[in-house]
Amino acid sequence: MLKSASIYKSLSKKAEEEKNVLFDIKGESSLSKLIAVPDQVPYDYMHLVLQGHCKWLLQKFFTTKSSPAYIKELASLQKELLNIKVPHFFNRKPRTLIEINKWKSTEIKLFCFYLAVPLLMRYLPSIYYCHFACYIFAIRMLYEPIEKNNFKYVEEIINNYVKYVGIYFGDYAYDFTIHAHLHLVKQVEQHGPLKSHSQFVFEVNI
């Protein structure tokens, strides 16, 4: 169920009147007097996309041997990765592929946004490669300023991506992280490109 600000307000009022929980809403939050939920509570792409779904995908590719998308030729792929010279403005270079659980957000961003699509072409089975590439292209389009008439195309790509996640990886893959991706296009329409409202700025200052 998509929860707009008006739906939250009506459900909160009804939950309080009936003293019941409606769609996980117990009543009006005190925060609602300060901000409009959910419109003014955007998802942080650093955690949702990079540390969330991207890391999950890379685990399926590099460390989960039972995964249908697991890459057996890791040594060859790793050699190619190490031979790539990354731009000087990247502070981190990706570590070994089997250390994916320890990768920082900047490492995942570098690999997924700039290296993974050409690198994995020869290693991933074609259906998983195309599925992954569509996801990365959609996120990259939302990451930068985007023309309004392209929103519908990105939304279609994400909807199809989410549809096939369960087919390719199993129904267990449908979690809140996947669901939240369905809201990203609307979020970018309201708040601007993903890079303009992420936690990266706070991570740098810690």
Image: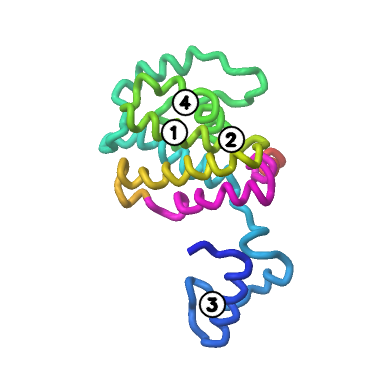
Give percent across and percent down for residue 20: 49, 83
Residue type at mark 4: give it.
Answer: Ala
Contact, CB < 8 Å: mark 4 with mark 3?
Answer: no
Q: CA distance from mark 2 to mark 3?
A: 37 Å
Seen at 33% across and 51% down, the residue is 172
Residue type at mark 2: give it.
Answer: Met
Q: CA distance from mark 1 to mark 3?
A: 39 Å
**Does the magenta run of residues contain 39?**
no
Front label number (2 vs 3): 2
**Residue sitting nearer the eye, 170 or 130:** 130
The residue tagged 1 is 100
**Residue sitting nearer the eye, 30 or 79:** 30
Seen at 55% across and 64% down, the residue is 3
**Callout 4 secondary element:** helix
User: Counting other residues with Cα less than 10 Å from the Cα at mark 4, is it few (<14), some (14-19), or many (20 or more)?
Assistant: some
Seen at 65% across and 37% down, the residue is 146
Front label number (1 vs 3): 3
Front label number (1 vs 2): 2
33 lies above or below 146: below
Q: Dividing the picture into quarters, in which one does residue 192 lie?
A: top right
Residue type at mark 1: give it.
Answer: Ile
The residue tagged 3 is 26
119 lies above or below 141: above
Dot 4 or dot 2: first in sequence order is 4
**Callout 2 secondary element:** helix
Q: CA distance from mark 1 to mark 4?
A: 13 Å
Magenta stretch: give its range. 174-200
The residue tagged 2 is 141
The residue tagged 4 is 116
Q: Dividing the picture into quarters, in which one does residue 5 lie?
A: bottom right
Q: CA distance from mark 4 to mark 3?
A: 43 Å
